Image: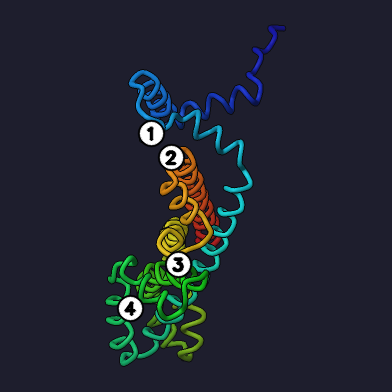
Amino acid sequence: MRPEPATPNRPLRMLKTALSRYWGVIAVLVIWQAWVSISGVNQIVLPQPVDVFRDLVAEPGIYLRNAGQTLLLAALGLILGMLLGTVIAVLAWSSTLLSGILTPLGLVFSSVPVVALIPVIARIMGYDLKTVLAIVVIISFFPAFVFTSAGLKTLPPGSSDLFRVLGASRWTRFTRLVLPSAVPSWMIAFRLAAPPAVLSAMLAEFLMGTSGLGYLFRSAASGFQTERALGTSVVATVISVLCFTFALWAERAVLRKWN
């Protein structure tokens, strides 16, 4: 019998997969390292990727502690914002009068730049974590409200007439038809709101916080610790990508069971 060809081990397969997927990022890092080394640019202006990685490894506690706070506020604000947007969308669906009042207010309020809202909310709620949480709630509210409102109105053809013919009550129609039909749209809103929740928490921490990744970035940049500022950006980027990946996985899992 002809012996079967040896299959590559698991670490080698993982390495090949990483190279095939992230070769662009690796190329940017290599070019960055080579350009800084050859040009001799000042480390304050642009440090080497090696220096950024060295700071991440040397001081993991600083990054983990601040990242944990930012991630916790982002997750809590995302949940509250999605819940608030869903409730207001349901109220707007339930009444034409409420729809005429809540829909314009929600759109106008969400169109205000978040940078302009932070000082106002900070004056009202104080310069602490409550303001950071409120900003994340506001950012997460808009996609939940818009997509849930659209999902509540997107029903299977003829389904609404069928429920009326069968004599279903308005509550039965809502719980058995309207609300389930909005779940796919709600999951899209969740996927779209997850990464901005982290970035909005960082923005609020950057402008008025005393801890968190945003504050860490501001203090590092003002102290000319460019490698730490870039390390904070790397951590924030990784967290945002992981949040998007988790939201995408959750959306696909729910839609598979829903369909």
Sequence-wise, which precedes: disc 4 or disc 3?
A: 4
Badge 3 marks a residue whose secondary structure is helix
- Residue 136 - label: 3
> Few, some or many C-alpha atoms within 10 Å of disc 3 (few <14, some 14-19, many ≥20)?
many
| Nearer the camera: disc 1 or disc 4 | 1
Residue 143 in picture, x, y percent from top left: 38, 67
| Residue 102 occupies quadrant | bottom left
| Nearer the camera: disc 4 or disc 3 | 3
Sequence-wise, which precedes: disc 3 or disc 2?
A: 3
- Find the distance from the CA under tag 3 to the CA under tag 2: 27 Å
- Find the distance from the CA under tag 1 to the CA under tag 4: 42 Å
The residue beneath circle 1 is 46
Amino acid type at mark 1: Leu
Q: Is 113 on the left-hand or right-hand side of 228?
A: left
Residue 216 in picture, x, y percent from top left: 50, 52
- Residue 106 - label: 4
| Nearer the camera: disc 3 or disc 1 | 1
Tag 1 near tag 2, CB within 8 Å: yes
Instruction: Check the image and report above or below for 87 versus 26.
Output: below
- Residue 226 - label: 2
| Nearer the camera: disc 2 or disc 4 | 2
